[in-house]
């Protein structure tokens, strides 16, 4: 499973070895503590640099990426290594927190696998994470379950930080650490900003990352058209079914190879998108590590970029993997943290749809985030009586193929100047099912919608009010796609 020669060289005469694991706590919270672009990008760079320092240690480093890692050492060096990692972390990642855990194994277990799984007991549920029973058939998977279980146990023991006293001047960027210096702030009329040493380092690192990777220096730079002056596009991608992939892995080398392949697919996809759309200086990637990707791009190109990205990520099919995505546009005045949290909610919605599907499909959830949109995933009632209910859903996951089909339909409506027909239809569906059908049919007959869709019944049943089999309280529930289609029409301003 693990490199036998390395294990023998580090163990000496000892028959027991320890796998020390680390996990940076709440990485996304650490990155988005502030809405300052440079501090956000600097936070991402700082985590990357910490992983790189771990990787370069003169130890048997199994993996170190995305703020998580595993290192194998003799048991007599277990505590020494933990202190070494802690010291390195707090020197490199000021303001961050890390959890360390360790599990001891016999040397032969790390070479041949765990023969007697009864020697290791893990709780069926720890911190909300469920583990299947170990069966000894897949030794690497068994070890991974044990390590994950211990890590979650250690995380559950973490004590919350003590709050700052009220009379301490807090950092005006993160609001957590005590301020230690004053910086010029071109975004504020006062011109000065009180910040902590951690945020100062983040800003400095962010400037380096923005320069090195040709990112946008400010949100206003992410602009290719008039629309982009008021709106930002965002894309968040997360890989599905990784648990199934990793549970089939037999050894550490295979784990590294497959993890690297996923990383390469995502990295190469980003590079190709940047090249195809001439995005140098016009985009940001605050998060990119392992199976996770978050991009901020010009709103006017977000769908075209996502379409290209989707095609490039199709190579994940070879590994029997799919992806879920949260895609949308947001008012440029929204804090990046809020945009990211909205993207996270959309990803969650897309993943729920993916898990309900029997096929290895890609799923996406789309939403326009404006100043009056608090929750990106919403369900509203259009009409309700004692027997029926008309509802609409926004930000709910659908297959990527269905999303682009709907988008093409709206694009055709727009080209034919038929978006007002959707608006009229929206007013009709706020009524009883039968009355809504009559009114939609009336407007259908008086419009030019036949150029795009010929059958009024087909239009009504597919888009206006479709019967939802998941009825509640014995009511018949009809779901409308009209509000969602109107959301899509906003992509063109």
Image (spheres, rainbow, N blue to C red):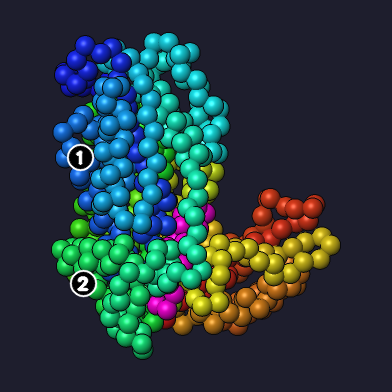
The residue segment tinted magenta is: 332-350
C-alpha distance separating marks 1 and 2:
30 Å
Q: Is residue 474 left or right of residue 139?
A: right
Q: Secondary structure at mark 2?
A: loop
Percent position of residue 229, x then y: 34, 83
Q: Quadrant of the N terminus?
A: top left
Q: Marks 1 and 2: CB-CB under 8 Å?
A: no
Residue 272 appears in which quarter of the rendering?
bottom left
Residue 407 appears in which quarter of the rendering?
bottom left
User: Is residue 262 positioned above or below 126 on the image?
Assistant: below
Percent position of residue 382, x then y: 69, 70
Q: Which mark is residue 281?
A: 2
Task: Please give the residue where the numbered disc 1 appears in the rendered image.
Answer: 55
Question: Which numbered disc, 1 or 2, marks the residue that appears first in the sequence?
Answer: 1
Percent position of residue 43, x then y: 30, 59
Q: Is residue 340 magenta?
A: yes
Judge by depth and name the residue closer to the eye, 118 or 358: 118
Q: Is residue 283 visible?
A: no
Give the residue drawn at x 20%, y 45%: 52
Judge by depth and name the residue closer to the eye, 317 or 26: 26
Q: Quadrant of the C terminus?
A: bottom left
Give the residue drawn at x 37%, y 37%: 100
Would you call the spot at circle 2 few (<14 residues within 10 Å), some (14-19), or many (20 or more)? some
């Amino acid at each position: 499973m693990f490199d036998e020669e390395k294990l023998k060289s580090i163990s000496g005469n000892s028959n027991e070895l320890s796998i020390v694991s680390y996990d940076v706590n709440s990485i996304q919270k650490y990155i988005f503590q502030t809405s300052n672009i440079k501090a956000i990008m600097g936070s991402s760079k700082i985590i990357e640099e910490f992983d790189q320092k771990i990787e370069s240690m003169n130890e048997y480093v199994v993996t170190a990426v995305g703020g998580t890692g595993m290192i194998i050492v003799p048991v007599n060096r277990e505590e020494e290594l933990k202190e070494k990692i802690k010291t390195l972390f707090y020197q490199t990642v000021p303001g961050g927190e890390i959890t360390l855990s360790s599990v001891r194994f016999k040397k032969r277990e790390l070479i041949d696998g765990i023969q007697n799984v009864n020697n290791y007991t893990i709780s069926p549920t720890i911190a909300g994470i469920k583990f299947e029973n170990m069966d000894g058939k897949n030794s690497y998977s068994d070890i991974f379950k044990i390590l994950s279980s211990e890590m979650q146990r250690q995380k559950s023991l973490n004590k919350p930080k003590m709050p700052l006293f009220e009379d301490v001047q807090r950092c005006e960027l993160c609001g957590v650490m005590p301020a230690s210096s004053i910086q010029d702030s071109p975004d504020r009329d006062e011109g000065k900003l009180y910040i902590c040493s951690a945020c100062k380092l983040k800003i400095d690192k962010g400037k380096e990352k923005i320069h090195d990777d040709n990112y946008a220096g400010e949100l206003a730079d992410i602009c290719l058209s008039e629309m982009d002056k008021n709106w930002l596009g965002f894309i968040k991608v997360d890989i599905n079914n990784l648990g199934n992939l990793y549970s089939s892995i037999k050894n550490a080398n295979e784990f590294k190879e497959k993890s690297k392949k996923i990383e390469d697919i995502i990295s190469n996809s980003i590079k190709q998108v940047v090249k195809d759309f001439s995005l140098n200086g016009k985009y940001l990637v605050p998060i990119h590590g392992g199976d996770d990707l978050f991009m901020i791009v010009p709103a006017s190109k977000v769908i075209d970029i996502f379409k290209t990205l989707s095609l490039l990520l199709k190579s994940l099919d070879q590994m029997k993997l799919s992806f879920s995505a949260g895609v949308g546009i947001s008012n440029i005045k929204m804090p990046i943290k809020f945009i990211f949290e909205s993207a996270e909610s959309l990803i969650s919605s897309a993943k729920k749809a993916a898990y309900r599907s029997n096929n290895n499909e890609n799923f996406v959830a789309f939403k326009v985030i404006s100043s009056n949109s608090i929750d990106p995933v919403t369900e509203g009632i259009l009409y309700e009586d004692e027997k029926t209910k008309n509802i609409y859903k926004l930000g709910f996951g659908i297959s990527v193929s269905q999303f682009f089909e709907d988008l093409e339909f709206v694009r055709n409506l727009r080209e034919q100047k038929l978006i007002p027909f959707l608006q009229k239809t929206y007013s009709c569906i706020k009524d009883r099912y039968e009355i809504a059908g009559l009114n939609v049919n009336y407007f259908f007959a008086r419009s030019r919608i036949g150029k795009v869709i010929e059958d009024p019944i087909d239009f009504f049943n597919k888009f206006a009010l479709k019967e939802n089999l998941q009825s509640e309280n014995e009511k018949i529930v009809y779901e409308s796609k009209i509000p969602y289609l109107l959301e899509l029409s906003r992509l063109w301003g």
